[in-house]
Image (spheres, coloured by chain):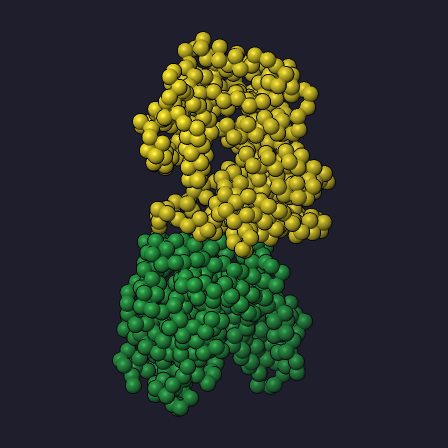
Chain colours: A green, B yellow
Amino acid sequence: MLIVQKYGGTSVADVERMKNVAKRAVATRKKGDSVVVVVSAMAGETDRLIALAAEITDNPDSREMDMIMSSGERVSSALTALAIRDFGEKSLSFTGRQVGIETDASHTKARIKKITAERLKKALKAGYIPVVAGFQGIGPKDEVTTLGRGGSDTSAVAIAAAIGADRCEIYTDVDGVYTTDPNVVPGARKLDKISYDEMLEMASLGAKVLQTRSVEFAKKYNVPVLVRSSFNNNPGTLVTKEDKNMEKVSVAGIAYDKNQAKITVVNVPDKPGIAAELFRGLAKANINVDMIVQNISSDGKRADISFTIPKTDSQKTMKVTRKIAKKLDAEKVDLLDNISKVSIIGVGMRSHSGVASKMFDTFAAHGINIMMISTSEIKVSCVVDAMYTELAVRVLHDAFELETEAK
Amino acid sequence: MLIVQKYGGTSVADVERMKNVAKRAVATRKKGDSVVVVVSAMAGETDRLIALAAEITDNPDSREMDMIMSSGERVSSALTALAIRDFGEKSLSFTGRQVGIETDASHTKARIKKITAERLKKALKAGYIPVVAGFQGIGPKDEVTTLGRGGSDTSAVAIAAAIGADRCEIYTDVDGVYTTDPNVVPGARKLDKISYDEMLEMASLGAKVLQTRSVEFAKKYNVPVLVRSSFNNNPGTLVTKEDKNMEKVSVAGIAYDKNQAKITVVNVPDKPGIAAELFRGLAKANINVDMIVQNISSDGKRADISFTIPKTDSQKTMKVTRKIAKKLDAEKVDLLDNISKVSIIGVGMRSHSGVASKMFDTFAAHGINIMMISTSEIKVSCVVDAMYTELAVRVLHDAFELETEAK
């Protein structure tokens, strides 16, 4: 088998842990598999570098930030290669550029366009355990780029796709993907398997196990991804293509996201095109709008338009929205930022009816008011007051019987 | 003018100092000059990285070490570029590879073969202050290489040569080049000017102001190098081609090196070729032999061969030497490692006679025994007992009247 193993920052946080990573890679090799290791920077290193830059300027240039941040993975990859050599296997570290991870030019959040992986294939053929610096690539003008927080996951899956690996193993500090955050629900159950689509929803709805784009890659190239802990030998969670078994369960997991804010443009004259004008303006300012609700007054002449955004973008969004609201002749713009989004996810929803109403009923039974709702084929999200977040997650976990092996 | 400014590790040791570096570069630019900045890693960073690797293995692969060590300069160059931008000038950081610093394949001590500097020239033309990561280059097989301790000096001078700079300024934590180590002789005088050849001898004989190879580059391409402090505006020392004035002084400076050991192969049968065999063997083992003395016994049948090496190579050298000595049928091999080398340097020696004998007389008058002597056109070196090092430097400094402006 050809296996890509990705180790996150906590798994290479210090020299002892790096040696454990090396040991695991070497053990896999000795079993007869070929292994490519992908590493993140040592835990805390990227933050340390960002803090240094923040001391220098409030407005750091993103090209320079990429040069700075990418250095963490260079160091951890070379150190890991040294550790593997010390265990007697051949190893070589590679930067993103050296394995040909070509990205677009969007510094600090570049997208992978192509991976040539020539040196990687050659090294594998020659019996090496290559160690690739995650999180980084090379832009169209020979500039160093980085792939955004969690980008090493995407490096790993993309490399697995490029070299036709049988599996991509993502090593982290948790045992796998859980039905929900075990910090909120101690009885949360580890999932043995989850579909790409479910994982995509989980990731984009706030579960922090995998970077969303890594799952998109895995789905697109059909790379089985195994999420597991680097601190034990538990089997982990396999992220894979949908199978019949998965559909038997109506809800696979519950996610929540507290980084939410709701902005309401109050009392806009309801003319055709107002929503278009508002959201065109927000898109131009690179603001990621999530849910949208429009209420029209009973006389049909005025409307309130509400939308949610990441809370961290609140100030910037308010500025842009106020400008547009003025042009639209709205009364005012309100910001509500003590909210959170709670979501249920499951491919089983497609065949199980009544899932959404069960969610609403559960909330009602516990006095949790729903402010906004959005649905897709395999998820239902509700915006609720932030103070109800944990309660909402717990009662849903109970209601959908996620704690027990629900088959 | 086109000026290359190189800042050492202590000059970019923290964010405040980096801002000072930026301020200086910006001030130079505002005066109408074009500036290229070359930086070392933040002081202590390279040692921190080496220590990490040492925790992993006693025998780190040099290719991986280069990957690890080169990251320090990447970070400091990008941070410095951010600081320059924050002062309102355009700036871009570049890695060794990005400015085309091509080296040979000798990891951790690579030699620069060529600098294309295309992106550098383009950036200068467009009004940027480029900040280049020192100490690093790119080897023939696209591998990251480093230039050895002090290699950023060489980066700077080589870049200055490549872009035809009018001057290379080396900023450090001292005011310039002194007649000798001010820690040993408080009255040591800062030199206004020193010739390339003198500086070369100073550097290779233990003065730590500039990397020897940087001076070789400066001499080869006739780049004026100004050594000065980044903490004040003192004028510094200009390293330049020899002029008449320099020859007026017999001795320009005094250097000492405590990293010395002497090995003696005792009682070798004196046959033709024994020295050749010994030193061929040492060269093969990559041992850098400095001085050599051969004493032949009065009957002409046996000889003692002594040579000096860096003390840090003692154990390795003894091992190799013992093996060869056995083959040569020598009686034994002795190691003496409490010695040091004290040297006087000056292009004036060419025209001033009696300089060497004045050195020997001075030593004799102070009871300092000379163990070995080696001379070149512009220097005399003596090996003495290590405990006399400071005394030897002080009495020579007095004897050659270096404290006063000797013209």
- Is B308 rendered above or below residue B282? above
**Residue A364 appears anywhere in the view:** no
- Residue at the spot 33% in from the left edge and 62% down from the top edge: A26
A120 to the left or right of A231: right
Q: Position of residue A305 (x, y in %)?
A: 57, 77
Task: Count how many numbered circles sit on residues in the image.
Answer: 0
Residue A97 % position (x, y): 53, 60
Quarter of the view holding residue B152: top right
Query: Residue at 36% across / 26% down in the picture?
Result: B268
The correct choice, above or below, for B209 with respect to B143 in the image is above
**Viewer-proximal residue among A69 and A267:** A69
Taking the spot 54% from the left edge, 51% from the top edge, the residue there is B139
Quadrant where the C terminus of chain A is found in the figure: bottom left
**In this rendering, is residue A285 above or below A358?**
above
Q: Quadrant of the N terminus of chain A?
A: bottom left
Residue occupying the point 62% across, 27% down: B195
Q: Position of residue A168 (x, y in %)?
A: 40, 71
Q: Nearer the viewer, residue B166 or B234?
A: B166
Camera sees residue A233 = yes
A219 on left or right of B402? left
Relative vertical location of residue B346 with respect to residue B167 in this rendering, above or below:
above
Closest to the observer: A196 or B279? Answer: B279
* Residue A104: image location, x then y, percent: 59, 66
Quarter assignment of residue B367? top left
